[in-house]
Image (cartoon, rainbow, N blue to C red):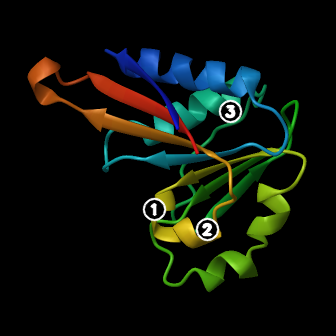
Amino acid sequence: MNTTTIETHSSEETFEFGKRIGENAQPGQVYTLIGDLGVGKTVFTQGVAKGLGIEGPVNSPTFTILQVYEDGRIPFYHFDVYRIGDVSEMDEIGYEDCFYGSGISLVEWANLVEEILPEHYTEIRIEKDLSKGLDYRLISMTQI
């Protein structure tokens, strides 16, 4: 496994890192996003969307599980599986069409649905370290 880490010191830097991911994303890529509440997953995701050319608001689909954005250069499938009761709910929303489709997928709280993740994906983990400041984030990206 190949892991890259970066440090950000503001929500703007976290956003910009997400934006670079979006600018370089290719159809069929799946990203998992892991981190505690309040670490900046939504800010990062908004950056990814901006990098894909999506102009509208991007919020975490906590209650709908999936939000689809089709106004960028490729479709963006944003999953938040925090409230999922059973992995079979992912079948009901057609996750395979997203994971193996013409856009990119980003799955928040992906550790809850590990058994359905594709063989290859990119895990993004965002962590705080309060000893380095309130806005400090360590972002690790691992190719799996």
Question: What residue is pinned by disc 3?
Answer: 49
Residue 116 quadrant: bottom right
Task: Provide residue 35's location: percent of width, then percent of height.
Answer: 36, 46
SS at mark 2 in the image: loop
Whole-Å distance between the Cαs marked 1 and 3?
22 Å
Question: What residue is pinned by disc 1?
Answer: 111
Q: How many labels sit on residues? A: 3
Instruction: Name the front one of labels 1 and 2.
Output: 1
Task: Provide residue 51's location: percent of width, then percent of height.
Answer: 70, 23
Question: What residue is pinned by disc 2?
Answer: 64
Task: Provide residue 126's location: percent of width, then percent of height.
Answer: 38, 36
Amino acid at dot 1: Asn
Amino acid at dot 3: Ala
Nearer to us in this view, 51 or 96? 96
Nearer to us in this view, 93 or 99? 99
Whole-Å distance between the Cαs marked 1 and 2?
18 Å
Above or below, 52 relative to 28: above
For image coordinates 16% across by 19% down, the residue present is 133
Above or below, 125 relative to 54: below
Looking at the image, is mark 1 or mark 2 earlier in the sequence? 2
